[in-house]
Amino acid sequence: MLNVGAKAPLFKAESTHGEVDLEQYAGKRPIVLIFYPMDDTPGCTKQLCAVRDAKARYEAYGAVVFGVNPGTIESHQAFAAKHRYDFPLIVDKDHRIRKMYGIGKMFGLIAQQRTVYAVDLNGNIAYAEKGLRPTDEILQAIERMSP
């Protein structure tokens, strides 16, 4: 797992909103990356519905939010449509992004660990926590990044 203060790796990847190029946001807006294990499971649904429901709060800080996991684009599109997610779900083909961010696998074998990163306007990790993090905690981290 990357530590607070580390430079956030930039990447390009397919998403439910077309190609995402993190470089387009770096230095311009706070970035939140939510690495979640699987589409349409109870914990993941709860976590991403909380993002959807807090859209205005994230937008108040100019933050962009991306969900990231190795599921297929078809799986991500169905999951996003079912729960009305209007933020991109990124396809982490071959686990490349997970590895860039130092995300392990649960019990070392199955789905990726649930981890949330927030990236500040300098491109550095300003928040890095494992688990199902509360929306208020993530938003407080973004608020601390604000000038």
Image (tube, grey):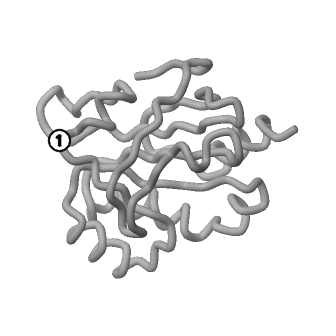
Q: Position of residue 116 (x, y in %)?
A: 49, 40
Taking depth in this image into account, of 41 and 76 the one nearest to the observer is 76
Image mark count:
1
Q: Position of residue 20 (x, y in %)?
A: 44, 55
From this view, report whether residue 4 is shown above or below residue 48. above
Q: Quadrant of residue 11?
A: top left
Horizontal placement of 129 versus 69: left or right? right
Q: Secondary structure at mark 1?
A: helix
Q: Position of residue 39 (x, y in %)?
A: 27, 61
Horizontal placement of 137 versus 16: left or right? right
From this view, report whether residue 95 is shown above or below residue 59. above
Mark 1 crowdedness (10 Å alpha carbons): few <14, some 14-19, many ≥20? few
Give the residue displayed 79% in from the left and 36% down from the top. 144
From the image, tell me which residue sits under label 1: 94
Q: Position of residue 132 (x, y in %)?
A: 45, 45
Q: Quadrant of residue 115?
A: top left
Give the residue displayed 39% in from the left and 29% down from the top. 101
Q: Quarter holding the C terminus? A: top right
Give the residue displayed 68% in from the left and 58% down from the top. 58
Q: Quarter holding the N terminus? A: top left
Residue found farthest to the right: 147
Give the residue displayed 21% in from the left and 71% down from the top. 74
Residue found farthest to the left: 109
Q: Look at label 1 and name its amino acid.
A: Asp
Horizontal placement of 95 versus 34: left or right? left
